[in-house]
């Protein structure tokens, strides 16, 4: 199911704060260095220091340029080429490229130029490439698949940029937040009289690009496992750190575990529902291999489901209809991916309301090994148990017993018709 990460950005977010928090949460520095070496980028080294502020310890990470005068402006295509030509795994490449592309799109909007003319100043140097790719390596190390972020404190004042003195937040930062519909923290006065957010840049363009590209702006239901603190450079009247929460996502039925659900309340509202979108396009000139790759790519990019239906098209050509279900927040990104990866000239989009039965996860033991079960609940009663394929297959291979035998044994051990744990 993949792990979950929550950006508790009470003091803002930047690329180096994110990397520091991932290291503090347990990502080995040697792993980070070895993987970053696959980029083939030189002229820098990493400096990691343990820091304590307000009695809280964490990591301050700096990317030190060894010869800053050698650094030049880079266009998007140059940065994407560095990433694509590296020996990094595809998911790291894809996430890092998406983050840089989102940043470039925001810059293009702000400056009123075509995307291919965008060149990066502050964020185009080696340190930004290391921050963004390194962050994606951290996500891969912790097997993160679900991303969330708190409201963001933007700060105020002015900042020096390659375009001169500009207001905080920087225009590219603000455009990224607007494009994503990010939630922002209000201005408040703290008990000691300090103004929060600070009169300083608290969300950098790199930090904004990371969270707006990957995160939903809400606090998730999760089983907390690790916490990491990544410190910023400035000192405020409060802790200047990004706090990352890492753990397991919880199913919808466990969203509020502190609330004791009664049988009556479960019966009165047995279903949860949300809004999703469906994307479709017809294809008659793609190979089976290409379609298989497309399905894998769409699922890796966050599609909820992908399916193919045989159809008969114009000129009596057999073809397939590609169908994709996705979160509404991912609609434009998934549509762009379909147009990029297929020969289609258009994508149809529909909006759906999805009703969902409650679900939970448990483990049972079969033949001396653990099997995960997905339990389906209606009106608070478990009515179906579905064993996880990978667990069943692993036991079947190890024991040389039929797959169905292991599957049924796992299913029969489920405690059906019991309410979910409160």
Image (tube, rainbow, N blue to C red):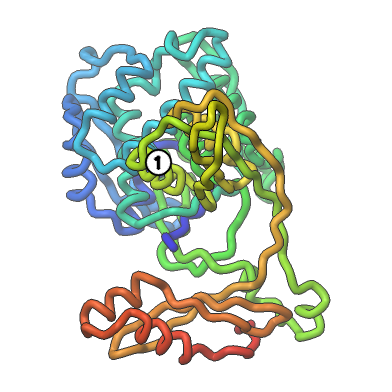
Residue at (65% x, 44% y) in the render: 277
Residue at (28% x, 80% y) in the render: 395
Quadrant showing the C terminus: bottom right
78 relative to 346 in the view: left or right: left
Residue at (52% x, 45% y) in the render: 310
Image position of 357 with respect to 381: above or below: above
| Marker count (numbered) | 1
Q: Observer-nearest residue: 52 or 13?
A: 13
Which image quadrant for residue 44?
A: top left
Residue that label 1 marks: 291
320 relative to 381 in the view: left or right: left
Residue 48 place in picture, x, y as percent: 26, 44
83 relative to 249 in the view: left or right: left
377 relative to 211 in the view: left or right: right
Q: Would you call the spot at circle 1 few (<14 residues within 10 Å), some (14-19), or many (20 or more)?
A: some
Q: Is any part of residue 238 visible from this angle? A: no
Residue at (51% x, 54% y) in the render: 6
Q: Is any part of residue 408 visible from this angle? A: yes
Q: Observer-nearest residue: 124 or 327?
A: 327
Residue 22 place in picture, x, y as percent: 36, 51
Q: Residue furthest front?
A: 316
Image position of 319 with respect to 421: above or below: above
Residue 157 place in picture, x, y as percent: 60, 23
Q: Observer-nearest residue: 100 or 50?
A: 100
Image position of 233 with respect to 205: above or below: below
Quadrant showing the N terminus: bottom left
Which element type, helix, strand or loop, lies under badge 1?
helix
């Amino acid at each position: 199911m993949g792990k979950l990460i929550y950006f508790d950005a009470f003091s803002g977010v930047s690329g180096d704060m994110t990397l520091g928090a991932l290291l503090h949460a347990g990502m080995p520095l040697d792993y980070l260095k070895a993987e970053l070496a696959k980029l083939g980028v030189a002229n820098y080294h990493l400096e990691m220091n343990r820091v304590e502020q307000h009695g809280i310890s964490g990591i301050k990470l700096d990317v030190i340029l060894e010869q800053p005068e050698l650094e030049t402006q880079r266009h998007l295509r140059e940065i994407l080429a560095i990433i694509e030509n590296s020996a990094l795994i595809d998911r790291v490449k894809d996430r890092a490229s998406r983050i840089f592309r989102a940043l470039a799109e925001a810059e293009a909007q702000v400056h009123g130029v075509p995307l291919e003319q965008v060149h990066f100043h502050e964020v185009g140097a080696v340190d930004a490439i290391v921050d963004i790719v390194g962050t994606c390596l951290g996500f891969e190390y912790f097997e993160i698949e679900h991303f969330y972020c708190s409201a963001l404190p933007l700060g105020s004042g002015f900042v020096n940029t390659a375009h001169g003195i500009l207001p905080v937040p920087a225009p590219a930062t603000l455009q990224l937040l607007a494009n994503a519909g990010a939630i922002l923290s209000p201005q408040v006065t703290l008990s000691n009289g300090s103004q929060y957010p600070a009169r300083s840049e608290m969300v950098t363009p790199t930090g904004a690009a990371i969270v707006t590209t990957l995160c939903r702006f809400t606090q998730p239901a999760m089983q907390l496992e690790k916490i990491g603190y990544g410190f910023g450079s400035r000192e405020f009247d409060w802790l200047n750190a990004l706090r990352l929460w890492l753990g397991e996502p919880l199913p919808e039925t466990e969203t509020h575990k502190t609330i004791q659900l009664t049988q009556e309340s479960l019966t009165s509202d047995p279903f949860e529902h949300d809004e999703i979108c469906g994307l479709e396009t017809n294809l008659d000139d793609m190979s089976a291999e290409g379609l298989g790759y497309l399905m894998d790519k769409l699922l890796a990019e966050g599609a909820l489901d992908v399916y193919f239906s045989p159809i008969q098209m114009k000129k009596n050509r057999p073809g397939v209809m590609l169908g994709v279900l996705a979160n509404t927040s991912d609609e434009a990104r998934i549509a762009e991916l379909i147009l990029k990866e297929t020969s289609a000239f258009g994508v149809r989009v529909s909006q759906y309301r999805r009703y969902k039965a409650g679900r939970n996860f448990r483990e049972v033991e079969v033949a001396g090994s653990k099997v995960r079960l997905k339990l389906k609940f209606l009106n608070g009663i478990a009515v179906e148990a579905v064993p996880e394929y990978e667990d069943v297959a692993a036991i079947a291979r190890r024991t040389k017993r039929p797959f169905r035998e292991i599957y049924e044994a796992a299913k029969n051990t489920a405690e059906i018709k019991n309410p979910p744990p409160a």
